[in-house]
Amino acid sequence: MTSTIKAALVGCGDVATVHAEALQALHDELRIEFVAVADTDAEAAETFAAKTGTKAYPSLSDLLANEDIDVVHITTPHDQHIDLALEALEAGVNVVLEKPLANELDQAQRLVDYLDAHPDAPKIAVCFQNRYNVSSQQLRRLIDSGKLGQIKGAYASVVWTRTPGYYQTKPWRGQQVRSGGGLLMNQAIHTLDLLQWFLGPARSIDGAVSTCKYGDVIDVEDTAHAYLEHPGDVHSSFYGTLTNSRHRDVELELDCEAALVELRDGLTVTWVDGRVDRYEERTQETEGRSYWGVSHELLIRDFYEHLGDPEPFWIGPAEAMNSLKIAKGIYSASNN
């Protein structure tokens, strides 16, 4: 790796802004040079390049042919994730890949299999940045410490709003073939990831999905519920919908032997002896959506700081498969 790390980005949509902000914020400290972007939409690429002071290309292939890149950030629609990630890895370029891992399990498995067959491949991270939130980190520490005692059960919810225009401006979001699903894949995947990170991968999955509000514009779900079994006979219940009139805070609760733990815009721990501990979430200015949180930069920083380490990044494709399997398991249960 050269002393200056050259970065590029593929896919100039909404979440690309957050990646660009992180790269620019880390420019001086980590010697990151953000040099190029690519998008099949030439106007989007040129606009984003002008905004970020980078060069625009029509494809990753063209970008790699003309630029010497160390890391590429992939922020495209879900159905493009795997082909682009494999192209970058095969070219010797490290990858930061937006969630979810892929639109379908068989596509995701291609990447997992490639990495298994190529242990010396470049590094790859999958953006489950909410694991870096203050609330998530503190809850993980409490679980690991054993202070919470036995976990008796868990509950999580994502109750947000969307408009028809959200899907009409970018139709892939509501198309099963491209996104791989709706609410569970686009909005709730982070919460499903946290559930399985705290409780362990789902051993059994039941649930159902429905399209209650936007059936005239999408062919994916806008509402879902699930009942999951985790190791140790611990169960979690999940509910999500995009039909609400406003965004509610994402909620995640653990009912534990020693405390009730509530993750909701920070973390509140109410101990059985009456003590209450509160951990506030970070805030910062961003052009991205507020409900994305502020931890993209922390994940990206962590990835760049450990580029030279021999071991894989801790949130890689194999780890990201866990939440994708939950989402796809809910779809499967709903169809049965």
Image (spheres, rainbow, N blue to C red):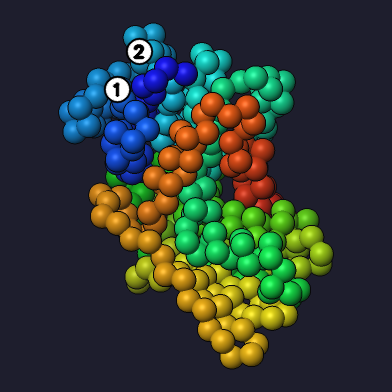
Q: Residue 67 carries which label?
A: 2
Q: In this view, does 330 lie above or below 278?
A: above
Three-letter code, disc 2:
Glu
Image coordinates for residue 283, horizontal then vertical, percent: 33, 61
Quadrant location of the C terminus in the rendered image: bottom right
Q: Quadrant of residue 292?
A: bottom left
Residue of label 1: 35
Question: Which residue is found at the position 59% from the left and 42% from the top?
Answer: 315
Question: Which residue is found at the position 66% from the left and 77% from the top?
Answer: 255
If you read the primary sequence from the N terminus, does the residue marked by circle 2 or circle 1 appear first? 1
Q: How crowded is mark 2: few (under 14 residues within 10 Å), some or many (20 or more)?
A: some
Cα–Cα gap, marks 2 and 1: 8 Å
Q: In this view, does 267 lie above or below 59?
A: below
Q: Are marks 2 and 1 in contact (CB under 8 Å)?
A: yes
Three-letter code, disc 1:
Val
Front residue of 204/299: it is: 299
Query: Which residue is situated farthest in the bottom direction here?
Result: 274
Question: Which residue is found at the position 38% from the left and 61% from the top?
Answer: 282
Image coordinates for residue 68, horizontal then vertical, percent: 38, 13
Label 1 sits on a secondary structure element that is: strand
Q: In this view, does 320 lie to the left or right of 99?
A: right
Front residue of 280/92: it is: 280
Q: Residue 253 carries which label?
A: none
Q: Is residue 111 above or below residue 231?
A: above
Image coordinates for residue 321, horizontal then vertical, percent: 65, 42
Image coordinates for residue 86, horizontal then vertical, percent: 55, 22
